[in-house]
Amino acid sequence: MILAGRVTRDNVVTRDVSETVHNGVEYCLSPSAPAAATPQGQPIALEILYEDKYLLVLNKQAGMVVHPAPGNPDGTLVNALIAHCGDSLTGIGGERRPGIVHRLDKDTSGVMVAAKTELAHARLSAAFAARDLDRQYSAICWGVPTPSEGDVTGDIGRDPRERKRMAVVTRNGKHALTHYRTIKAFGLAAAMVVCQLATGRTHQIRVHLAHIGHPLIGDPVYLRRRPPVATMLPEAARRFALDFPRQALHAQTLGFSHPITNVALRFTAPPPADFKRLEAVLHDV
């Protein structure tokens, strides 16, 4: 029999383990406190770009997790939305992710929309599923894509060699299409690109740009080795780019039809300070 938990012997804590239970040995388990059944509101500042009684558009900061998950039980966008909107948000679109229509990775900044009513949630979710919207991202990648503008296609699914990563796969993936356009080249070492999503797969831009040999600067998952083009940068710029602490990706623009009034809405948020600093350092090369 295997027993999992916090093990003590003679009232002395030994370690958190899973181990075999032996005859004649007394064990004492201290289970973790139960998590709240639903997320709780927390007073976390939000940069709100637009709000009415049906929806809210905000500029998510890098480092904020969108909804509670293992390892991030609170301090999320959902906790902030519940505190901001009150009990009216509870349960909209699901108890664990109320109001959430789409997601951005924890360390990706930029424009998001959240629903405040069930009808708005249903219609916004349908618009995202049908790709009936405009999503543009700013990114800074290693190297300069050739051609300077084009489409990246390739089904995206779990990396068969490392299940925590996504990858372009030939089996069991979902169709994905990303259009990119190079805005600025920093010599041959790096480039700023604008990416427009035709589909919305997990880590799509990060996976597609890495697939064509231009991973995002700072990407902790898809930048697997020191890029050779980094040697083209002066030492200070090279060090800054190699030490950039997150993927250089910002959800710049989100356009969609209002789910109730059908009025066309379009929101743009400037990149955050760290993204601008990276651009400035590379620009001075």
Image (cartoon, rainbow, N blue to C red):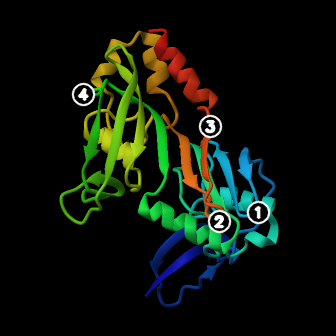
Mark 1 lies on residue: 53
Distance Cα–Cα, label 4 vs label 2:
41 Å
Distance Cα–Cα, label 2 vs label 3:
23 Å
Mark 3 lies on residue: 269
Identify residue type, mark 2. Answer: Ile
Q: Are marks 1 and 3 in contact (CB under 8 Å)?
A: no
> Which element is circle 4 on?
loop
Q: Earlier in the sequence, mark 1 or mark 3?
A: 1
- Decide: is 245 above or below 153: above
Residue 147's mark?
Answer: 4
Of discs 1 and 2, which sits in the foreground?
A: 2
Q: Earlier in the sequence, mark 2 or mark 3?
A: 2
Apparent side of residue 285 relative to residue 280 in the rendered image (left or right): left
Mark 2 lies on residue: 260
Q: Earlier in the sequence, mark 4 or mark 2?
A: 4
Residues packed near mark 2 inside 10 Å, few (<14), some (14 to 19) or many (20 plus):
few
